[in-house]
Image (cartoon, rainbow, N blue to C red):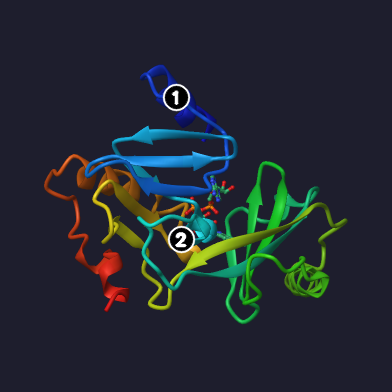
């Protein structure tokens, strides 16, 4: 990710690390992006804030039924050598993956929104399921709670806002957002530049949720 960011900056892109609070029209073909104590006008705004995307306020935003499927991981920092490849434990709902920083046990789906604290019982469940599969696992390392952005039909929303053509949605990639990041970026670029799209974006339009 840092290499991509560096390349973006080398190509003339500007990276601003701030919280977007609102997006409002700035005429017919631009939008004003509001941040704490600051706002800027852009030709286009891509909403790619994962499960938080619909928390951004403003009259350009459609009401979309985005929720989150929370998932957890437990690292076993000394145990990457126990596996030579990722292994899925289908019955337990998690994956064991050997990584540079150890063996990562990750998965489960928890419906508890964006604000609830991490549930330690979920971490214990993952740890115990991993130990049942691999009794040689040693100490437990760091843990993580992630927020998968999910819509009711398990498809992302990729395409223009119905309220302003300068706003493009790119969120809701549920369990496979890392996998789909590249092609989503390409599709967003083609939508903005009004090029022929690499895949038909119709199934991903926000309009499917708007009556
Ligand atoms: C346990 C677990 C395992 C997973 N494993 C895989 C896997 O193996 N392969 C895979 O493809 N996917 C996997 N996923 C799913 C993947 O993590 C998500 O689909 C992906 O992160 C979604 O990407 P995103 O960029 O849309 O959202 P995020 O990765 O959530 O990024 C959104 C970003 O927007 C920022 N943001 C939010 N609000 C604002 C705001 N108002 N202003 C500015 N910035 C804001 C956030 O801080 C965050 O940095 C897994 C998820 C979990 C929980």
Alpha carbon separation for disc pair 1 and 2? 27 Å
- Residue 124, percent from left and from top: 82, 71
Q: Looking at the image, is mark 1 or mark 2 earlier in the sequence?
A: 1
Does residue 182 appear in this view?
no
Name of the residue lying farthest toward the bottom: 91
- Determine whether the beta carbon of the residue marked 2 sits less than 8 angstroms from the nearest atom of ligand 1: yes
Q: On the image, numbered disc 1 is attached to which residue? A: 14
- Residue 32, percent from left and from top: 39, 40
Q: Is residue 185 left or right of residue 136?
A: left
- 1 and 2 marks in contact (CB < 8 Å): no
Number of other residues with Cα within 10 Å of mark 2, as a class: few under 14, some 14 to 19, many 20 or more = few
- Secondary structure category for the residue under label 1: loop
**What's the residue at 26%, 69% (across, down)?**
207
Residue 176, numbered circle: 2
Residue 152: quarter of image:
bottom left
Name of the residue lying farthest toward the right: 139
**What's the residue at 43%, 53% (across, down)?**
179
Between 179 and 101, the one lying in front of the other is 179
**Quadrant where the C terminus lies?**
bottom left
Residue 96, numbered circle: none
- Residue 49, percent from left and from top: 49, 51
Residue 192: quarter of image:
top left
**What's the residue at 73%, 69% (across, down)?**
116
In this rendering, the answer to whether 131 lies above or below 31 is below
């Amino acid at each position: 990710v840092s290499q991509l960011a560096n390349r973006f900056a080398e190509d003339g892109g500007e990276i601003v690390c701030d919280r977007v609070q609102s997006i409002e029209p700035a005429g017919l073909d631009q939008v004003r992006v509001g941040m704490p104590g600051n706002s800027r006008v852009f030709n286009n705004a891509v909403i790619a804030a994962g499960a938080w995307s619909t928390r951004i306020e403003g009259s350009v935003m459609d009401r979309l039924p985005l929720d989150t499927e929370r998932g957890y991981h437990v690292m076993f920092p000394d145990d990457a050598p126990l596996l030579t490849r990722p292994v899925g434990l289908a019955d337990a709902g998690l994956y064991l993956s050997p990584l540079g920083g150890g063996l990562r046990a990750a998965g489960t789906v928890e419906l508890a929104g964006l604000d609830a604290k991490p549930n330690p019982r979920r971490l214990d469940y993952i740890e115990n399921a991993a130990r049942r599969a691999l009794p040689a696992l040693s100490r437990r390392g760091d843990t993580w709670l992630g927020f998968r952005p999910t819509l009711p039909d398990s498809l992302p929303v990729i395409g223009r806002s119905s309220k302003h053509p300068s706003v493009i949605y790119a969120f809701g990639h549920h369990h496979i957002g890392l996998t789909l990041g590249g092609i989503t970026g390409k599709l967003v670029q083609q939508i903005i530049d009004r090029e022929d799209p690499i895949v038909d974006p119709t199934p991903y339009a926000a309009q499917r949720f708007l009556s």
